[in-house]
Image (cartoon, rainbow, N blue to C red):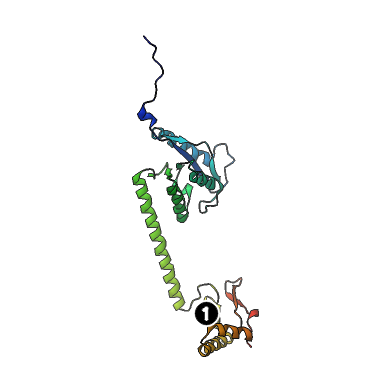
Amino acid sequence: MAKRGPKTLSANSTSIRQVRCAVYTRKSTDEGLDQAFNSLNAQREACAAYVASQIHEGWQLDPTLYDDGGYSGGTMERPALKRLLADVESGRIQVIVIYKIDRLTRALPDFARIVEVMDRHGASFVSVTQAFNTTTSMGRLTLNVLLSFAQFEREVTGERIRDKIAASKKKGMFMGGTVPLGYDVHERKLLINEEEAEIVRHIFTRHAELKSVRELADELEAEGILSVVGTFGADGCAEKRRSGLVWG
């Protein structure tokens, strides 16, 4: 009887697409990073175990370390994250594996930008301690719902802030920015500056007579009437640097 040779993989087993996975870890402070087993190691170990559990899906762990120790999640200026996104764009990495979503980013706009990069190159990310996996249709649906609510929240917050500023201005409160000509600011209140108010009246009168903004500007410049620069003093009250304002 002929000797039986080694087993070969079936056609079905060889058809599994290989997926290269990268583990990304982050810690906001550098405290404890000098320890033999630190927070980054714990995150990587949990993520590596998850990748190993998905070997039947063709997942393979990339040995490259993408560790951002001592970097805040509120910014994209992280060296390891930049290298990781570059590898995603090159097609080297297909799945980003993280311990929790906030390890990837804590800023919703940055989160949307990261997801946009991954979508553009057919990549996705997985959070191993949360039921969130964008490699599945349900995970992607959850992501879209979360981003939609996040955008809605930002827009509502913006509307609320604009309404508050408008209401405050109606009450005569100064809400920041350049102090308008003709006014001074004291304890967030706009107070008429009589000297500058005379200049403002003159500008409006001459504009009505000339009916040309360019001619008015040339005339004011010739008369030495210049804009003032608003600044804030140490006490938080707005001040004006009057050196540039001359009333001829």
Instruction: Name the quadrant containing residue 15.
Output: top left
Local packing at callout 1 (Cα closer than 10 Å; few below 14, some 14-19, many 20+) is: many
Q: Position of residue 51 (x, y in %)?
A: 44, 36
Q: From where the camera sits, is residue 110 visible?
A: yes
Residue 213 to residue 126: above or below: below
Circle 1: residue type: Leu
Residue 86 to residue 183: above or below: above
Q: Position of residue 231 (x, y in %)?
A: 59, 73
Q: In percent of the image, x 43 and y 70: which residue is there? A: 162
> What residue is disc 1 on?
190
Foreground pick, 208 / 199: 208
Q: In percent of the image, x 44 and y 53: which residue is there? A: 112
Q: Give the side of residue 57 with respect to residue 43, left or right.
A: left
Q: Give the side of residue 243 with respect to residue 13, left or right.
A: right
Q: Quadrant of the N terminus?
A: top left
Q: Position of residue 61 (x, y in %)?
A: 47, 36
Q: Quadrant of the C terminus?
A: bottom right
Foreground pick, 13 / 175: 13
Q: From where the camera sits, is residue 193 visible?
A: no
Mark count: 1
Residue extending farthest right: 243
Q: In percent of the image, x 40 and y 16: which residue is there? A: 5
Secondary structure found at label 1: strand
Residue extending farthest top: 1
Foreground pick, 63 / 194: 63
